[in-house]
Image (cartoon, rainbow, N blue to C red):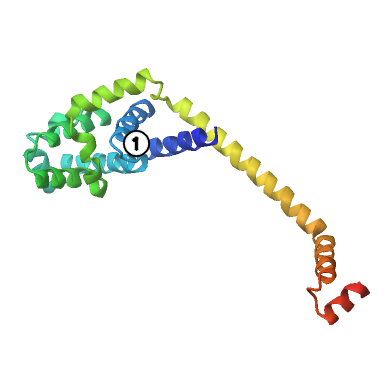
Amino acid sequence: LSDAINRGDELAKAASKSGIAANAFTELAYAARMADVDVSGLSTALKKMQVALSTANSGGKTQISTLAALGLKIEDLRDLKADEQFEILADRISKLKDPADKARAATELFGRAGADLLPMFEQGAAGIEKLRKEAIAMGKSLSGEELARFQEADDAVKKLGESWDSLFDTFIIKAGPATAGFLNFTRAMLGGLTEAERLRIELE
């Protein structure tokens, strides 16, 4: 249960950072995991992609050139949702023949995490779509409300842990002197104290 809550909380935080809808992100996260791509890396890459496309839309030469190498113009992507933009870019990158070209395009559009996404891009948009449908069928496509519940559960677990820590701290503070005295007495009985330490304990 704890592992499930932690995974859900991680998904919720990553989805929030990615800037795309929760359902779309959790479906892409499932596809990413099938390619051994971690969730935080996917989130960062999606955010970098949106920045890259915004820069292209503002006339950024490097980004426009990268899109052109993929046979795209910013106008082809401007009005699409972020997950749709992601799939199109993944599809075009998968069709590049030179691995170096794939790595360069992925890095320029998705940042340093881009190269890690290449295994996810191998089957193009069709492969990603197939995995997204699997995610839906398996109940892995989660809404913002569902992710919020994971965060609430994670917060509750953390607060419970803090409560137990506080209780333990209080016990140590209250019982500490008596516990220390008992341990010192035990050491004395076992011959682990010097004569001076034994005398001090007896006087206490």
**Residue 80 in view here:** no
Taking the spot 7% from the left edge, 34% from the top edge, the residue there is 71
Query: Which image quadrant is residue 189 in?
Result: bottom right
Query: Which residue in the rendered view is the most extreme toward the top?
Result: 137
Can you give x and y, in whole percent of width and height, for residue 62 in the image? 12, 48
**Residue 31 in view here:** yes
Left or right of residue 90, residue 188 in this image: right
Taking the spot 17% from the left edge, 47% from the top edge, the residue there is 108
Can you give x and y, in whole percent of width and height, for residue 159 in the image? 63, 41
Query: Which image quadrant is residue 153 in?
Result: top right
Q: Nearest the camera: 85 or 11?
A: 11
Are there few (<14), some (14-19), or many (20+) residues within 10 Å of tag 1?
Answer: some
On-image quarter of the N terminus: top right
Taking the spot 84% from the left edge, 63% from the top edge, the residue there is 182
Give the residue at mark 1: 19
On-image quarter of the C terminus: bottom right
Q: Nearest the camera: 200 or 162?
A: 200
**Amino acid type indicated by mark 1:** Gly
* Relative vertical location of residue 190 with respect to residue 28 in this rendering, above or below: below
Can you give x and y, in whole percent of width and height, for residue 9 in the image? 48, 36
